[in-house]
Image (cartoon, helix red, strand yellow):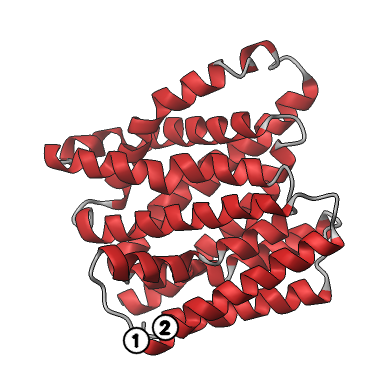
Amino acid sequence: MESKQLRWIYLSVLALIWGSSFILIKKGLLGLSAIQVGALRIIFASIFLLLIGFKSLLTIPKQKWKYLAITSLFGTFFPAFLFSIAQTELDSSVTSILNSLTPLNTLVIGALFFGIGFQKRQLWGVFIGLLGSLLLIYNGAQNHPEQNYYYALLIILASFCYATNVNLIKRYLFDLSPVSISTGNFVVLIIPALVILFFTGFQAQIHIEKIQKAVGFILILGILGTGIANIIFFKLIQISSAVFAASVTYLIPIVAFFWGLLDNEMLSPIQFFGAFIILIGVYLSARKQ
């Protein structure tokens, strides 16, 4: 199959997986703390990837490990905790929409730090996307005073982390296999995640039924939404561009929104309009591809 066709298949599969991640985080938070959710997500993904990709570690050149360490922080470690903390205050559908700023930030990071050129239209896309985000956040804060919309800043920060990660992989790790990159990332992260989980007192809570149920949701999130999804994502980066790969966030809010509806979440008409503006900005920023 040609790479042009294949990249759209990868994009669609990723959207289904990652669009479902937000509701899994929400369900995990019903029994676990945000820090426990982030740590367990990394641990489960690490165990899964080590089981299927341990041999791939032998193919990684020594000089590449510094980039794997950096991308593991920006692409997984920081976002895993930022999203979990943010969803203690925000609906899953809102966090998924704000996550769609990733392609815009990929363009900005690429232009500022990686020397990647852009068109004037794409710059307009960045400004339009920011306008939509401000509208979404402001209206959400007005209509949901019980939610702390300052936590939206954590999602925006996570999107910058993802954007940095995409550009780093495209520049420095393009010649490694997706399994090697994924497994290498999580080899770096598993020990810190275990240490963090230990200090949350998780080991004393695991016998509680509510905790066990929450862990089940994070197990699915770790294996499917992090382990398998990362492999697909890194492959997508290799056969397309950084901005195209990041544009998976076009589709993620659609999937997450339907999950949110099933869980009694609802956006206001103004928030819908803000989300629409964000997606227009994302479209303009990625249209070059």
The residue singled out by tag 1 in the image is 119
Instruction: Residue 191 in the image: state x and y as whole percent.
Output: 40, 23
The residue singled out by tag 2 in the image is 122
In the rendered view, does 268 fall on the left or right side of 68? Answer: right
Instruction: Residue 229 in the image: state x and y as whole percent.
Output: 47, 52
State yes or no: discs 1 and 2 in contact (Cβ < 8 Å): yes
Question: Does 77 sit above or below residue 22?
Answer: above
Residue at point 77%, 18% (across, down): 208
Quadrant in the rendering for residue 209: top right
Q: Is residue 212 visible?
A: yes
In the rendered view, does 232 fall on the left or right side of 12? Answer: left
- Dot 2: within a 10 Å radius of its alpha carbon, few (fewer than 14), some, or many (20 or more) residues? many
Q: Give the structural element (helix, strand or loop) at label 1.
A: loop
Question: Does 25 sit above or below residue 241?
Answer: above
- Quarter of the image that includes the N terminus: bottom left
Residue at point 27%, 63% (across, down): 113
Disc 1 marks a residue whose amino acid type is: Gln
State the CA–CA distance, disc 1 to disc 2.
5 Å
Disc 2 marks a residue whose amino acid type is: Gln
